[in-house]
Image: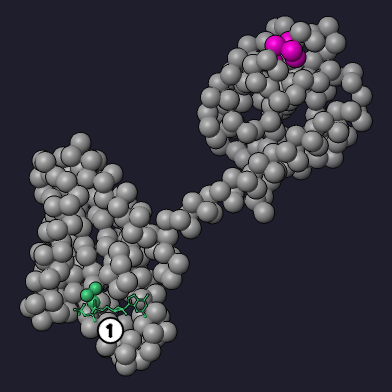
Amino acid sequence: MPVMSNTVLIVGDSANSRKVVAEILESTGAFHKKLYCADGRRALHWLRDHAVDMVCCNLHEQNRDALDILVDEMKREAEWADLPVVLFAQPEDRGLLIEGLETGASEGLLLDAGNAEISARIRWHLKNRERIQALHHAQNRLARMALSDGLTGLFNRAYFDATIEQETARSLRTKKPLSLLLIDLDHFKKINDTHGHQAGDRVLEEVALVLREQSRTSDTVCRYGGEEFAIILPETPRSHAQMVAERIRHKISTLNCGFAVTTSIGINCAERPEGLVPQTLIAGADEALYAAKRNGRDRCET
Ligand code: GH3
Ligand code: MG
Ligand code: MG
Ligand code: MG
């Protein structure tokens, strides 16, 4: 279950107007933490830096511009679209509440509505937020699952395909080099045959760890196929890609699996990416990989 911070941001243009709202919210017992600010502009700043579950604004004619900022601007930002905004006003400013609701506020409450009603409504919005957060959480988990490999936790082939397209386009735009490593375990069939498929799986997991450790956060490490891996290295010249590949080859050859494991690595780099398409980058790395196999395995080729 995603955590709620149980924090409310109270917006009011005077200490008293904030206090009135704070006291009402106190009676709901719904919040652990209250933050305060004077206007919509400052509220947006607070929201950028703090986890907040609800915004409560005490409105009147003199600070009605808070409406435009809080409701209008906030709702345009995807990350705040689900954040409940509750407006409070004196009975004579009821029109502002209606205006606010029309603009996209979640709730409009008269300050004299009574604690029982206010509390019930506030709690409803918090529950609703919790439900929406849980949905987002589940959705993100599914999206991650669809793009990752079940055994190693690395990105899968589908993610590789999308990322290589994206990085190729970026490299064309920025004119920065783009490197690709294709990594294939040597005689892996024999490892399976000799030590069993489960031992083979453990090797794949160990190799995945090495690849993760040896790459940067800007690199994309994928399980390309059964015992093949790929690393996309943006803004990386050939010499650096060669260094990374050699480090990986060496680390894998010194893994302690109870038996020897080696890899062959094909390196390709688009140093000047004019006219680059993913297919040529991949084909080049594939050719280099075959050369590494041909030339005796446990080696890197460019
Ligand atoms: P080479 O050095 O030429 O690459 O030889 P190789 O034996 O590694 O190549 P080959 O493509 O003939 O065999 C790959 C083997 O990898 C065959 C397949 O059973 C095994 N393999 C593929 N996916 C998995 C997996 O998820 N787990 C395990 N344990 N083995 C796998
Ligand atoms: Mg093969
Ligand atoms: Mg192999
Ligand atoms: Mg293979």
Cβ of mark 1 under 8 Å from ligand 1: the answer is yes
* Residue labelled with disc 1: 189
* Percent x, y of residue 275: 11, 41
* Percent x, y of residue 6: 72, 42
Q: Is there any visible trace of residue 137 in the rendered image?
A: yes
Residue 251, compared with residue 123, is above or below; it is below
Q: Residue at x 80, y 10 (%)?
A: 94
Q: Which residues are magenta?
A: 96-100
- In the image, 11: left or right of 190? right
Foreground: 271 or 132? Answer: 132
* Percent x, y of residue 42: 59, 23
Q: In what quadrant of the picture does the C terminus appear? A: bottom left
Q: Quadrant of residue 187?
A: bottom left
Q: Residue at x 58, y 19 (%)?
A: 72
Q: Residue at x 30, y 87 (%)?
A: 191
- In the image, 226: left or right of 265? right
- In the image, 287: left or right of 81? left
Tell me the chief SS of the magenta region: helix
Residue 294, compared with residue 1, is above or below; it is below
Residue 160, compared with residue 132, is above or below; it is below
Q: Quadrant of residue 100?
A: top right
